[in-house]
Image (cartoon, rainbow, N blue to C red):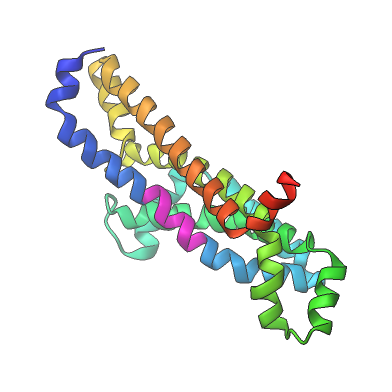
Amino acid sequence: MNFDWIGREADRIGELLVWHLGLSVIPVVAGLALALPLGWLAHRGRWFKSALLSAAGLLYTVPSLALFVLLPSVLGTKILDPVNVAVALTIYTVALLVRTVCDGLDSVPVETVRAATAMGYRSAHRLVAVELPVAVPVIAAGLRVAVVSNVSIVSVAALIGAEQLGLLFTQGAQLRFLTPIVVGIVLCLALALALDGIVVWLGRALTPWTAKAGAA
């Protein structure tokens, strides 16, 4: 490890880390916002559930590098525009979370839904106040996968020159210099662990009754 290089490049590394964080988190937030209604439709619309989930699965199999290259022509952006990466990762997040949201809503006990209906909860109110809170543990588990996956996939965008930690990998490979590669790996792992921990904390904060049940 060349610590002198790390000291000289600290500001640049910090900038790449901030870009990597933004490109990892923003698509998760946008993807979840889109996946919630789509997952609900899959949960409610039994007749097209299979088609919707299959389409989401197919989207997730599209190579990320192909999307990074194709999206500029679709969106009218430049190849190095971070919007391309954000949109591609949002697509992957939606593809992953649609099934997660559907599975989470499917996991809500029928008795709970019936009790809420008997108490006067209408469909929309019941979804927000009862069904989604009960589904949070399942959705949070899917979010953890999405967040960690995004941290990894963002690095691939270094092949098109997008600003993020993946550039340390390409720089190290081109210069045959190990230090940038090690720094990039360590920071990606640390970022993934930190974001995963935040999702776990949020899941527990939104479902305080699970902690009480476990203590009992």
Q: Is residue 216 left or right of residue 7?
A: right
Question: Is residue 175 within the magenta segment?
Answer: no
Between 82 and 109, the one nearer to me in the picture = 109
Residue 162 visible in the displayed image? no
Magenta segment's dominant SS is helix
In the rendered image of this protein, does residue 164 appear above or below residue 210?
Answer: above
Q: Which residues are magenta?
A: 23-31
User: Where, by quadrant of the figure, is residue 154 drawn?
Assistant: top left
Query: How far from the left and from the top, in percent, is residue 200?
Result: 56, 46
Q: Is residue 5 left or right of residue 122?
A: left
Residue 126 visible in the displayed image? yes
Between 198 and 82, the one nearer to me in the picture = 198
Between 35 and 156, the one nearer to me in the picture = 35
* Residue reaching furthest to the front: 216
Query: How far from the left and from the top, in percent, is residue 133?
Result: 66, 65
Q: Is residue 214 left or right of residue 82?
A: right
User: Where, by quadrant of the figure, is residue 84 drawn?
Assistant: bottom left
User: Where, by quadrant of the figure, is residue 86 drawn?
Assistant: bottom left
In the rendered image of this protein, does residue 5 appear above or below residue 117?
Answer: above
In the rendered image of this protein, does residue 162 appear above or below residue 10?
Answer: below
Between 188 and 53, the one nearer to me in the picture = 188
Residue at 76% across / 73% down in the picture?
44
Q: Quadrant of the N terminus?
A: top left
In the rendered image of this protein, does residue 127 appear above or below residue 32?
Answer: below
Residue at 33% across / 57% down in the picture?
83
Residue at 14% across / 16% down in the picture?
4
* Residue reaching furthest to the top: 1
Question: Is residue 30 within the magenta segment?
Answer: yes
Residue at 28% across / 54% down in the picture?
81
Query: How far from the left and from the top, in percent, is residue 36?
Result: 60, 67
